[in-house]
Amino acid sequence: MSQHVVQKIITGIWNGHIVYWDSLSTKSTKQPRFYDPQTTDPFSRLRVPKYMKYYEVAFFAVFLCLYYAVLIRGKTSQMTGAEVALLAWFLSFFSAELNEWYDAGSIFYATDFWNLFDVAMILIGFIFAVLRITGLCLDDSNLSGWAFDILALEALFMVPRICSILSLSPYWGTLIPCLKEMGKDFVKFMVLVVICYMGFLTTFSLLGRKVFTFAQMAMILTKIFFGSSYIGFEMMSEIDPLFGPPSSSSSSRSPTSSSSAP
């Protein structure tokens, strides 16, 4: 991939100098060729990766604006034009993702990190549409309120999706894959954290079962593992006068709790 000839071909495909389709017709055949503006259908330029990416950026920018316009205005007694446009954008987004899934296949589609965000966005949008339309039809303000609460969750996936647009930049295009690999390593490391957490939770919940409930002890231990070590020293005598202090000291000094600290 790093050879000059290969990079030249990839750049040619990206810029549209090398094309695979000479028209948008369903009868056209897929064959690599150099782009000839005299014989090639102008609308076939919509298949050029660079132009497709520009369209994706513009589509997502409008999508984001509609999302904030609907969310900031909040619940109304009837569906607004911005809501209708947002639902239309959701349908278009779903159609594009469905076509990508058909073209790439389910296995290859799932390997792309951002596709998981897209699926989550579509599911949240679908739930919002169902609750919003049902709430308006039944004149139920609670359902409409739930719809907008669920729509607020969309920002957890939509806003980070901007990072995929930044990948067009050479700097971000190199940095973002590195961050993705770091995220994968973090998930693997969290397996060790959970194992250690379960061991301490078992010990503390049994030692302090006369004073704390299981839910209370789980919350206390979670705070300790996220860096609030002082809580362990404050609670150690209440957990158990004999075994509480040494157990709390070991949990506060464990590598998992110190690495989770801010």
Image (spheres, rainbow, N blue to C red):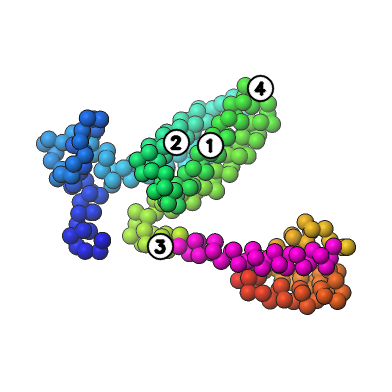
Q: Nearer the viewer, mark 4 or mark 2?
A: 2
Check disc 4: other Cα within 10 Å, few if <14, some if 14-19, many if 20+. Answer: few
Q: Residue at x 57, y 35 (%)?
A: 127
Question: Residue placed at 66% from the left, 68% from the top?
Answer: 196
- For marks 4 and 2, the one nearer the N-term is 2
The image shows residue 151 at horizontal and vertical percentages of: 58, 39
Under mark 1, the amino acid is Gly
Q: Is residue 179 visible?
A: no
Q: What span is colored magenta in the figure?
A: 181-209
Mark 1 or mark 2: whose residue is earlier in sequence: 2
* Residue 171 is one of the magenta-drawn residues: no
Q: According to the image, label 4 marks what residue?
A: 138
* Percent of width and height locating residue 126: 54, 34
Residue type at mark 4 is Leu
Which residue is denoted by mark 2 in the rendering? Answer: 94
- Report, in whole angstroms, how far the alpha carbon at label 4 lies from the one at label 2: 27 Å
Image quarter in which the N terminus is found: bottom left
Residue 145 x/y as whole percent: 65, 34
Instruction: Report the disc number at residue 157.
Output: none
Mark 3 secondary-structure assignment: helix
Task: Give the residue number, with chain letter if any, for mark 3.
Answer: 175
Q: CA distance from mark 3 to mark 1?
A: 30 Å
Amino acid at pointer 3: Leu
**First of labels 3, 1 by sequence position:** 1
Contact between labelled residues 2 and 1, with CB atoms less than 8 Å apart:
yes
Residue named by callout 1: 125
User: Is the residue marked by circle 1 packed among few (<14), some (14-19), or many (20+) residues within 10 Å?
Assistant: many
Residue at 66%, 31% (x, y): give it.
143
Q: How many marks are shown on the rendered structure?
A: 4
Q: Quadrant of residue 63?
A: top left
